[in-house]
Image: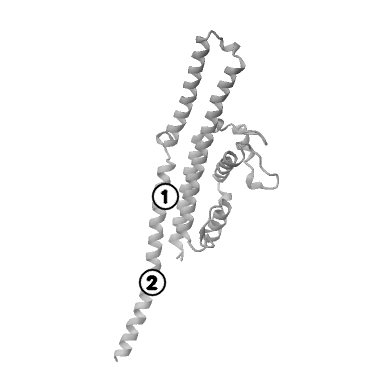
Amino acid sequence: MTDKTGTEFLYKRKVSLKKTMPTKFIYKKRSSVLLWARLADDIFPENYEDSTWAVWVKRIKEGQSNEKEILKSRIKKWGKKLNRVDDRYAEDFWRIDHVTNSMFGALIVSIWSQLEHFLKGMVEVCHEKECKRENKRSYRFDEIKKCLEKVLSIDLEKWRSYKMINAIRILNNSFKHKNSYYKPEQKKSYEHISPTLLQRWDIKNKKEIDFSKIIIEDLISACAIFHEKLVRAIKEKLRNDNMD
């Protein structure tokens, strides 16, 4: 009698655990997803004007303008006219624009770094085992895409915001690894920015990128739309499946 009761108790306990553990596990994942979503909301807010990015764009432009005004005042003081600037002063103007361009490039690198960090975090929350390779975090964007497609059936390349997101990645790589030049390999489609964006930003093949022509607000808006859609897709998946 005791054995039977004990066996029945253990069986019922086992069934109970099977039912409750996935729910707790999913709840934990939902909480983690919401945490990452809140962090992304702070980094890529819907209202661009209140963002840190807008503040930095303003600082960079003001710095460029102030430096040029200082240089112009020096030229006037030395009795030079703006339409007769010699090579030395022309080089000074070029240097101001070059530093400004580098600062905009660094800003875009920071945007990609923040977005990539968000993507890695979301991927690991959703499926730790599937999205790790040799017990290490996946740092490549193509691996992140493959994991999202495998685990969540999300094909990022079909999203409207993907072209802009991929362009940010390419701009990041061009600044960091190609001395700010746009030099995609012909056979590697993932290294190519869409023709529409190339025209909008006046980027030419094998030419140096003028990062100051890229509207940062457009990039931040694309990141905000992208991360919100990804959060919605993952929350929907967690609702429908027991992800273990």
Q: As shown in the figure, which amino acid type bears the numbered disc 2?
A: Lys
Q: Is residue 126 above or below residue 102?
A: below
Position of 39 compared to 207: left or right?
left
Residue at (37% x, 77% y) in the render: 14
Total count of labels:
2
Position of 131 compared to 52: left or right?
right
Q: Residue 68 location, x and y as percent?
A: 51, 20
- Could you tell me how far apart the alpha carbons at marks 2 and 1 are, in whole angstroms? 28 Å
Q: Residue 32 location, x and y as percent?
A: 40, 56
Q: As shown in the figure, which amino acid type bears the numbered disc 1?
A: Ala
Spot the residue most to the right: 186
Q: Give residue 199's quadrant in the image.
A: top right
Residue at (53% x, 7% y) in the render: 79
Q: Nearer the viewer, residue 109 or 20?
A: 109
Position of 122 compared to 5: left or right?
right
Identify the mark nearer the N-term, 2 or 1.
2
Q: Is residue 137 above or below residue 177?
A: below
Disc 1 secondary structure class: helix
Image disc number at residue 19: 2
Q: Nearer the viewer, residue 230 or 167?
A: 167
Position of 187 compared to 178: left or right?
right
Q: Nearer the viewer, residue 32 or 100?
A: 100
Pointer 1 residue = 37
Spot the residue most to the bottom: 1
Please identify, in this view, whether the residue under mark 2 or under mark 1 is nearer the observer: 1
